[in-house]
Image (cartoon, helix red, strand yellow):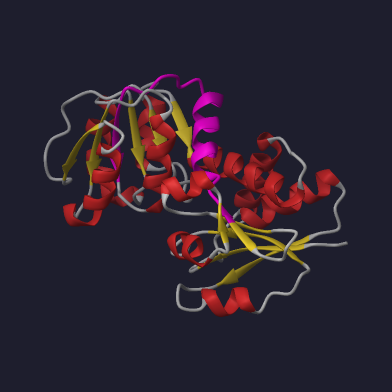
Amino acid sequence: MPGRCAVLGSPVDHSLSPAMHRQAYAELGLDWTYEAHDVDVDALPGFLAGLDDTWRGLSVTMPLKQRALELADEVDPFARVVGVANTLVRTERGTWRAHNTDTSGAVAALDEQGVGQVGSARVLGGGATARSLLHGLLVRGLEHVELVVRDKARVAELAERVRGERIEVVVREFDAPFLDKVDLLVSTVPSEVVRHDAHDLVDASRAVFDVLYDPWPTALAATATVHGVPLVTGLDLLAHQAAGQVELMTGSAVPAARLREAALAELASR
C-alpha cells in the first residue's frame, strides 16, 4: 500500500528532507509520497490527531523535537536517554513511536570523514541538535566538553545530564578567548554568530563539525578547508540521519551517499 510521509517544522520551506526521502523511494521502487508541512509546537497535537493510517512516518525538525517525544505513544529507549526525537514512525498498532537518528547520523558522519576518538569537544549552542550530537560523542571516548552559549541558564539541565555520564563539563559564553585545543569543534549556531571568531575556533580544534549547510560554505567550514583541518558538514549529518529515518519508516536501507547527492542537487537548483 502506498505510504505517506512528511517533514514537520516551522519554518520548513528550506528543508532538504523531501529531496532526500523522494530519492530513497525512487531507489527502493516505492510508490510513496513525502511532503513538507509548516507546523509549530502548539499545532503539533492536532496535526498528528488528523493523520489517517496511510501515514507511515514523520521527520521532525525545529522547534518540534522535544514536543514530538512528549506526544509519542512509545519512545525508543535511546531517544528517551537523549531527550529529543527527530523521527516519528507509525507502528503496526497505529500508534506513533519516537526515535532519534540525529545521534547515530552524527557518529556515522564522523566515521565517514575519518574523525576517530574524541576525548575533548567544544560545542557551540545548546539546543536539540547539540544535545543529540553530545550523546553521539559519548560513545567516542568523550572526557571533557566545553558548552559555548549566549545564555548559560539555557544549558543548565543539559550540563548536569552530561556530568551524570562522568564527563567534565565547562559552560561559558562567546566573549572569552578560545585558547585550549580540543579534538573536535561542533557548531550548531548560525554562521554569523562565529564569523569573527572563526579563525581562533578552527585554530584551537583538531577537527570541525559544522551542522549548518545553507548558505554554504559557513565561516567555520571555509576556514577549516583553508587550514587543512578535517571537516564534517551539515550535509553529511543530514544524509546519514535521513538514511536512518528511511530505514525506520520503510524497513529498507539506502546509502547515505545517494541521499547526500540528492540534497546537493536540490541546493544547486535553488
Q: Residue at x 85, y 62 (%)?
A: 2
Q: Is residue 224 above or below residue 213?
A: above
- Image coordinates of residue 65 in percent, x first then y, are 47, 59
In this rendering, would 18 be left or right of 86? Answer: right
Residue 100 part of the magenta segment: yes
Q: Position of residue 185 (x, y in %)?
A: 33, 32
Q: Which residues are magenta?
A: 98-124
Write the residue at 24% across / 41% down.
147
Q: For the C terminus, give its image quadrant.
A: bottom right
| 269 vs 259: above or below | below
242 vs 45, nearest the viewer? 45
Residue with the most extreme left position: 176
The answer to whether residue 81 is above or below residue 225 is below
Say how many tags the image has: 0
Query: How far across and down, in percent of the image, does residue 50 sit?
Result: 66, 79
Residue 42 part of the magenta segment: no
Q: Name the residue nearer the viewer: 203 or 78.
A: 78
Residue 60, image quadrant: bottom right
Image quarter of residue 84: bottom left
Picture quarter with the N terminus = bottom right
Residue 109 coordinates in the image, percent (x, y): 53, 32
Task: Give left or right: position of 227 versus 261.
Answer: left
